Each structure stands twice: as C-alpha cells, then as structure tokens.
Image (cartoon, helix red, strand yellow):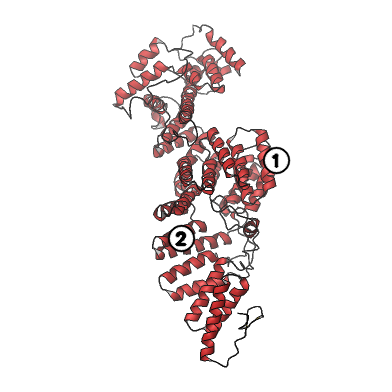
Amino acid sequence: MLTSTRAAELLTSIPESTFDSTSHNVPPGAPLVTRNVDPAEARLEAIEIDRYLLAKSFFDCREYDRCAAVFLPDALMAGVLTSYRQSHGDLLDGETRGSGNFGGDATHTSTIDDMDDVKSGKLPELSQKSLFLALYAKFISGEKKKDEEVEMVMGPHDMGDVINRQLQVISAYLQTWFDQNHVGMDEDDELVVSQGWLEYLYGMVLAKEKNEKEAMEWFIRSVHRFPMNWGCWQEMTMLITRVDELNKVAPRLPQNIVSFLFHLHASLELYQQGHNLATSVEQLLSIFPGSSFLLTCNALLAYHSKDLIAAEHHFSMLLAQHPHRLDSLDHYSNILYVLNMRPKLAFLAHLCSSLDKFRAETCVVIGNYYSLLSAHEKAVLYFRRALALDRACLSAWTLMGHEYVELKNTHAAIESYRRAVDVNRRDYRAWYGLGQTYEVLESHTYALFYYKKAAGLRPWDGKMWMAVGSCLQKIGRPRDGIKALKRALLADSNHESAGGKGGLSQSSAGGTSSYMDPEVLLQIALMYDQLEDHEEAKSYMELCMAQEEGVPVGGEKSTLRHDPMGASSRPENDDDMEDDSGGGGRGNEGTGVTPATSKARLWLARAAVSAGEYHKAIYLASELCQDGVEVEEAKGLVRQAKAELKAFEPNQDLSLADASGTELTTAES
C-alpha cells in the first residue's frame, strides 16, 4: 500500500499538461482511465486521475484527512462553510462545530481561482467520484475523532453526547452542490446526471443529525440512481423501526433483485418470521445456493422463530462451508449459550480468535463463552473490547447489560441498555432488559414503559406481554393486566400453531396448539381473585392445573419457551435447558407438575374447603402431598377437611384413594 502511495505522490508531482481543463472535449486517453458514460464526468475524471489515485491510496492507508485534503483543502472548506452561513443565515449550534481542523496536512493547495469561486458562492469543479471520496473521507475522519474523544467505553467522558464535528461542513458543501446542480428536483431540471453516491453520503449526514425522515428521502433517491450500493440499503434498514414503515417504503423502491434482498434483510432485522419470509429465502437460495448471506438469513429466520435447534444446525453448516467468515457469528454464540453447548462455544471462540482477534464479533463470542462459565467480570471485559473496536456493535451493548445485571450493577446495566437503544431503537432485547432492571429497582412505572416498548416491537412474543401484565398488576391495574396476559396466551398459541423451521406450520391442517403457559394462567387467576371474581379465578386455576396432562393434537413442537436473547432467558441448569429445547416437557403429553400447577392445586383445595367440598379438597391436597410441594399446608388442609367431614358424618370411613390408587389414611396424614 505504501508503494502505491509513493508512486501516486511521484505521479502528482509531475507538472500538469497544457490541456485546457475548461474545454468540454474529452482529453486523450480518457476512455482508458474512466468507464463513465457521461462525457462531462468522464472528462473531469480523466483530468483528476492522478490526484484521485493519490487520494485513494491515502484512503486505503486510513489517512482520511490527507485523502480529503487532496481535493478539498482546509481553507477551501472553511470558505464553503462561511459562504453557506452567510447565504442561509445559519449559525447552527456554535462556531466550534466545523470551524476547527477540517483536514490533515494538505498535499495540494487550492488555486486562487478556486478560492475566488468559493467566495462568490461557486464550488470548484470536481467529478462526483472525487468529491464523494473526499467528503466520505472527511466523514470517516470525524467519526474516528469522535471515538477518540470518548476514550474508554463507559468511562467518565463516555456520555453518548459527542458529535462528529465534520457533519456541518459536509452538509453545507453538499447542500450547496445540490442547489447549484438542481439535484433532488425533477430529473429533467438537473444540470448534471447524478450517480447516487452524493445522495447516499448526504443521507448518512442527515441520519447522524437525527433528521431521519429527510435522510430516508435521499437514500431512496440514491438507490434509484445506483441500486447496487448495498451500504445505502443498510442505512435505510437502520432507519426502519417498524413493519408498517417498511411497507410504506417498499412501493417507492426500484423493483429488482437487490430491492428483494433488502426487504428480506430488513424483515429479519425487525425480527419477523412466517411462511412468506421462509418462501422468500428459499426462492433466493434456489438462485444463489452458495450465498453465505442467504444461508445466514436462513439461520436467523429459525433463530427468530425460536427454533434454536434448527438455527444451530444452519449456522453449523454455514461455518463448515465458510470457515473464515466471522459475520453474524455473535448470533451463533448466543444460540450455543442458550443451548448450553459449551464445547461448541469453546471451539467457536478458539476459531474466531485464530482468524482475527481484533474483530468485534470475536470479542462477543469469547464474552459469551466466559458468561457461560459464570465468569461475568471477564465477559464484561470482552464486551467492552468489542465496543472499543466497534461502538455500534449492538450485541455487545445488550449482552454487557445482561452481565451487569448478573453482577448486581444496575446503574451500569441501565446505561448499557440505553446505549444499545441509541444504536438501534428496534432492539426489543434492550428495551426488555431496561424493563427488568427497573423492575428490580421496584420502579414499576418505568418498567411498564419499557416493557410496552418491547411488546410493541415483538407483539407475537408472549413473554413480552407477560412482563407487561405482571407490571400492571404490581401498579394496581389488574383488569389491564388480565388483558395483557390473555394477549400473551394468544401470542403463544399463534406461535405454537405456526411453529417449525422458519415459521412453517408443522401442525395438522386446521389444528391449534393445546398448550398454554401455566404461569400465565396462574397470574390471570390470581388477578381475578384479587378482583373478587372467584368463578373466573376458579376456571383459570382449573385450566392451569389441566396443563399437566395436556391434550393430544397433531404435530410436533420444537420451539422454546424462553427468549434466546432476553436477560432472564439464560438457563440456570441443565434441567431447564432440557425442558426448553426438547419439546417433551411441553409437548402433547403436557407440562407435568410445575410450581404454577401446584399453586393452582393448592388454591383450588383451599377454595374447596371454603365451599364445603371436603372430598374434593382431600383429593387435591393429597395430590400435593405426593408432589412434594407445600406438603405441610396440604396436610393441614387434609386434616381440616377430614375434621369437618367427621363432624357432619361421624361414621364415614375417611380413608381416601388418591389419583394413583394409593391410600392416604388419617394416621399417614
């Protein structure tokens, strides 16, 4: 790289030819150095080829200020900003923004004519290719200096309020360029044929300044002019936070294969699932069967559908085909964590470390491995390293928040989750983590706000609505809590009926899942009991207890009860993992005895005693004695019920057979 830089410096040191740069004729040899079909742009690119090669070599060496200074020296940029402020009366937020160092050591100084043009409000004549390279280098330089000002991740100066000081001058230059060339208006009125790259850069500047609506307009213009710029599609994805926003944007996009890929990518970023999305992935894989991007999409689709076994299989196959690819392996490590596959996670950590130690994905994978070993301090260390390498690494922010929760450092956990939300507002895991942390602090109103945010981003996930319902109950709104918990039951039943790989239904035609979460049913019953609606409470308690047996229905279930990335979703032991991943504990055979069903049985036993149904009370309480749950209270209920029966029917034999046929005598009780 340094060799090309030295060669380019020597090339630009040669005196320029006497070719008239103001002529509209294409200079000799221009077709050899440019492929632009626009004669005007081809002429400018041919004139600038020497300087462009020098600037590109600086860019490749990451000397961004030197790269920008080749075409846009400091004095010229300061003049552009001053002229823009005078013409627009715009002082913005202080003279410090954009008024400092606009670049590094300027290899080329602007000519007197260029400075005179700038003072008169006219920009120097540059090709769009060179202008984009210079302004983009300035943009990256500003981002780099912004990270340097922050210093340590979550340190004393890392308040999240440091800005890119180059945004103002880039914005001023681009607005002036668009105004002079009428770009952005009707294409018939444009003085130049835009290539789409400057629109892309201006959209990024607007997005950084939180002007997201206008940024989306410029991104759409950019992809219409050059649809193969995947970076622009990714920036558009970052601005879309809800499915309805994606549906509004989709009709305005060019209809081609890249737009189709964008729709798939954006849907997965919004955690979507379902048959249509799975069909789209299959169609694209039939065209590009070896695409690592599409194979990753297939794995993520299973991941979002909570089919972690299938997702792990897809990622394993992807890793076998592309063993040197680190993209999205942080998601793979999350799956291995939840599935408690420590040997595979250790192998993945060693593999990533051998490929590139200084990649954010590598640090996230190693952090997950240490977290699985319960070495939370080391896990935090590696997540911080990931953020030092890439401040926009969403997984690192969220997972570091989980680790701080484990370390009981709620302040640091809240800050981590907030930074994750700043990076990506559609990350339901960070919103949910904030809700959990505030719930630990018993700030239930704040927790409810964040839980609602998470539920709005993932409305088909029953876990989100369970959290909302529980919070509503704690702040004294049981009726609203019941509505939320019923929605959780509906979401879980819809997910079960659409289960399987990629969201494809595996159940029989027209069949629905008989499974309902006993914990949700118990909470609903307790809320009805709180409202003194004892009939409804009783019916939900009976429904909760009925989940132990289950009802045979067609189809298998391979989904997980827990959210793969939630703070409370990480399994505490192998028994929890077995219950969640297999489907045997929550399949057609029922859940078996759980703490929720035992509480429901105890409530029903008490209610039976209060209602004078002593035989039923003895039967329920004796089952509790066999389950080993609340045994002492159950024995007390048996004694109380038998005493009441003996008072009314003194000659009755009080020996009872329980559900399994064994006798519970008075002496045994």
- Mark 1 vs mark 2: in front: 2
Give 166 or 28, whichever is nearer the viewer: 166
Q: Mark 2 points at which residue?
A: 470
Which residue is at the far front?
667
Label 1's element? helix
Image location (x, y in percent) of residue 89? 28, 26
Q: Tell me the distance, in whole angstroms, between the alpha carbons under discs 1 and 2.
A: 45 Å
Looking at the image, tell me whether mark 1 or mark 2 is earlier in sequence order. 1
Label 2's element? helix
Give 113 or 558, whichever is nearer the viewer: 558
User: Is residue 192 shown left or right of residue 299?
Assistant: left
Which amino acid type is marked by label 1? Gln
Which residue is at the far bottom?
651
In the picture, the quarter occupied by the C terminus is bottom right
Query: Is mark 1 in CB contact (under 8 Å) with mark 2?
Result: no
Q: Name the residue under label 1.
A: 321
Any part of residue 318 in sight = no
Give 430 or 233, whichever is nearer the viewer: 430
Image location (x, y in percent) of residue 402? 53, 47
Which amino acid type is marked by label 2? Ser
The disc placed on residue 373 is none
Image location (x, y in percent) of residue 98? 38, 24
Image location (x, y in percent) of residue 186? 39, 32
Any part of residue 554 in sight = yes
Q: Quadrant of residue 616?
A: bottom right
Give the vertical position of 333 relative to 635 (above or below). above
